[in-house]
Image: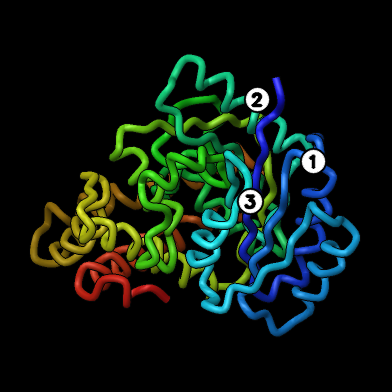
């Protein structure tokens, strides 16, 4: 049986530090070169991103293609890629990351194998291994590695399972078109909303930790808090669009809980319990990772929960304009 043709879609903006490594791993995949293509959508970069991609395009004719995304935001690149893709499957991948060289092979093998048992399969994703540019980046990654962050399971799960959302996934292009592509109101969190819509239509997503990629974790406090704010806003904008999960109400419940701490003694005891849970999780993460910085998690996790909650409320009030 002939292997399926795959389109890899990579949006990029000012990624000269990372795009070379990303493409180097993509052009050297353990998959026939005539059975995939790499489309890089440059969001009008002001650094050497375009130059680097064009060098790959020249060296790997028919494999790498440089494209311009004049609207700059990655969600537009996703839809441009979906429209222009020659593959029957496509992968959305970040320029700030790179895949294992068997990433494509394992993604295809996983999809074909799971699809035999689950004909409603729409996509498969894998494990993201975080890389750290500095100590802060390594510390921030501890937060997302904890279930208390509310992060998707692909950040910390180790077993194959059907999931609500997956990252850097291989998708069936016809199903993607059937559900309407990517929602351009979602200037961030667009892949999350896309996966929600896939689930809402009755299709399935599968996580296989053997499909591995590497992601450079954010390394500034500004970037961390911006991402956290958007993380909250994504959930509330999705609610405005008709999606709902009880756990998404955590931000409202959390802010209400904090507001009641001073008027009511009971809530003070509950707040103490909250901090005990945070401390316990910090100790657990310290033992699991051998990173002593994990012991500083409680106050930062508390800030994280508050910033997410603020983003959630702002998103409820003003919708997509909340995104930063």
Judging from the image, what secondary structure is the residue with disc 3 in?
helix
On screen, 48 above or below 207? below
The location of residue 14, given as percent across then percent down, is: 68, 76
**Cα distance between the residues tagged 2 and 1:** 17 Å
Judging from the image, what secondary structure is the residue with disc 2 in?
helix
Of callouts 2 and 3, which one flags the residue occurring earlier in the amino acid sequence?
A: 2
Q: In this view, does 51 lie to the left or right of 174?
A: right
Label 1 or label 3, whichever lies nearer to me, is 1
| Residue tagged 3 | 292
**Cα distance between the residues tagged 2 and 3:** 39 Å
| Residue 303 shows up from this direction | no
What crowding class fits label 2: few (fewer than 14 Cα within 10 Å), some (14-19), or many (20 or more)? some
The location of residue 48, given as percent across then percent down, is: 79, 78
Which residue is drawn at the image coordinates 43% and 22% (left, top)?
119
Of callouts 1 and 3, which one flags the residue occurring earlier in the amino acid sequence?
A: 1
| Residue tagged 1 | 34
Which residue is drawn at the image coordinates 50% and 22% (left, top)?
115
**Cα distance between the residues tagged 1 and 3:** 48 Å
| Residue 293 shows up from this direction | yes
What crowding class fits label 1: few (fewer than 14 Cα within 10 Å), some (14-19), or many (20 or more)? few
Which residue is drawn at the image coordinates 28% and 47% (left, top)?
273
């Amino acid at each position: 049986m002939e292997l399926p043709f795959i389109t890899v879609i990579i949006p990029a903006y000012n990624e000269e530090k990372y795009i070379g490594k990303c493409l180097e791993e993509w052009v050297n995949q353990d998959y026939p070169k005539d059975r995939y293509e790499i489309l890089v959508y440059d969001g009008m970069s002001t650094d050497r991103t375009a130059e680097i991609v064009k060098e790959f395009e020249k060296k790997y004719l028919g494999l790498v293609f440089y494209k311009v995304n004049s609207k700059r935001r990655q969600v537009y690149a996703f839809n441009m890629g979906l429209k222009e893709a020659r593959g029957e499957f496509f992968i959305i991948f970040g320029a700030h990351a790179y895949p294992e060289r068997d990433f494509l092979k394992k993604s295809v093998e996983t999809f074909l194998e799971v699809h035999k048992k689950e004909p409603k399969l729409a996509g498969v994703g894998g494990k993201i291994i975080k890389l750290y540019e500095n100590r802060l980046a390594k510390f921030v990654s501890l937060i997302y590695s904890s279930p208390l962050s509310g992060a998707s399971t692909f950040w910390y799960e180790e077993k194959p399972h059907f999931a609500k959302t997956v990252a850097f996934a291989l998708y069936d292009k016809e199903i993607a078109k059937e559900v309407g592509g990517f929602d351009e109101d979602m200037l961030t969190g667009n892949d999350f909303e896309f996966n929600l819509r896939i689930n809402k239509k009755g299709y399935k997503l599968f996580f296989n930790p053997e499909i591995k990629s590497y992601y450079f974790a954010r390394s500034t406090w500004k970037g961390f808090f911006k991402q956290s704010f958007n993380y909250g806003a994504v959930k509330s904008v999705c609610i405005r669009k008709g999606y709902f999960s009880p756990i998404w109400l955590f931000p409202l419940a959390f802010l209400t809980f904090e507001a009641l701490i001073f008027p009511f003694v009971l809530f003070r005891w509950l707040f103490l319990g909250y901090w005990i849970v945070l401390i316990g999780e910090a100790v657990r993460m310290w033992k699991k990772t051998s990173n002593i910085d994990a012991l500083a998690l409680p106050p930062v996790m508390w800030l994280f929960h508050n910033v997410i909650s603020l983003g959630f409320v702002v998103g409820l009030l003003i919708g997509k304009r909340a995104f930063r």
